[in-house]
Image: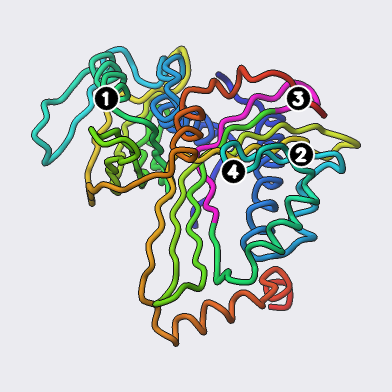
Amino acid sequence: MLQITDAELLARAEISDLLVRYGQAQDQDEWSLYEGVFTPDATIHFPGMPMESLGAAEFGQFLQDFNRTRISGQHLIGNTLYRFAADGESAHVVSEVTYITLHPTDTPGRVRRIRGNGLYSDRAVRTAQGWRIARRDIAQKNVEIDEGDYDPVLLAAIESAATTRWFARPGNPG
Amino acid sequence: MRLTWQTLRDRAELLDCLTRYAQGVDQRSWPLYDSAFHESAQVEVPGYMDAALSFVAFREMLASTFDALRLSGQHLLGNMRAEIDGDSARTVTEFLATTLEQAEGGSLREVTPGLYIDDFRRIDGEWRIVRHAIVRKAADGAVIPFASPIADAVRATLATDWLAVAASH
């Protein structure tokens, strides 16, 4: 029977924070969150995709450049499975992800949608600065691309929300 | 960041609050929905509502505007980031909503990814939402054919109090 120790529970939470920081960095366009997700020498791989492996900094730049082509995006992460090494200093972490990004087209009000499902396979390591991802493989399970028409009010609301710094928003009225 | 047990406990309670909200809305369990909010809580939906509503007025809008046609709804929560400062907290949480409503020729399926931005206060030891903002990242609807046995099954689930069922097992 699997028994999770207190130490492993804390480690899982800290690794989960890395996954959330990565997802929200690109989805909320808040790149300070991306710092500290990967080790400086981490590599990111794209099995089956026509794309060379990248270092963490290169990949971060790639994502930032991609964000300039999009209106909004979401990478929803779930079903994370953790397998720790016997010494508790590293772990293999596999998560499902479902995603959507919206992109402008030449026609006002018409957007291009990229929707898909995939998987993150991560090797996480405990460092002096905390847990970090040392290697990520991004696997695609499904990708669909199409176009659709959006109401201008909705599109304006989406664009506004995508550029809002939510943690900087003033005051808790309660 | 090194996490502490207190932070984990707070996060679990914040997530429980959001889950009560989501399941309250999805299972149309309004006491569960109400239990997520402080009595003064406001709800904002930029681009959909011109001004914030009280959580009670928002609940009444959901129950009156949508339920005539509603078949089912799911607001799946994920990727929650929290900043906790004493008895105040803010969370930013990704959600993916899939809703079905009756439409001519089948069912209107709407898929909406978005964010919940929530301000919380801990009052008398209990976290409650004081401001709930809903922002959308996309919204795509399509009428899909919906075979009658499935529609009947979906409708049947709407009338079920799943927490009561679970408690009776």
Q: Residue furthest right?
A: B124
Q: Is residue A9 visible?
A: no
Calculate the distance from the C-alpha at mark 1 to the C-alpha at mark 2. Answer: 35 Å
Q: Which residue is mark 1?
A: A66
Instruction: Tell me how many marks there are.
Output: 4
CB under 8 Å between discs 2 and 4: no
- Inspect the image, locate mark 3, and give the three-letter code of the amino acid beneath it: Asn
Give the colouring mode of the picture.
rainbow
Q: Do dots 1 and 2 share one subunit?
A: no
Q: Is residue B25 visible?
A: yes
Q: Is B19 placed left or right of B71 in the picture?
A: right
User: Percent from the top left, x then y, of residue A65?
Assistant: 26, 19
Q: Which residue is mark 4?
A: B48
Magenta stretch: give its range: B75-89
Q: Residue B42: which disc? A: 2
The kind of secondary structure element at disc 1 is: helix
Residue positioned 23% across, 51% down in the render: A142
Q: Which residue is mark 3?
A: A172
Calculate the distance from the C-alpha at mark 1 to the C-alpha at mark 3. Answer: 33 Å
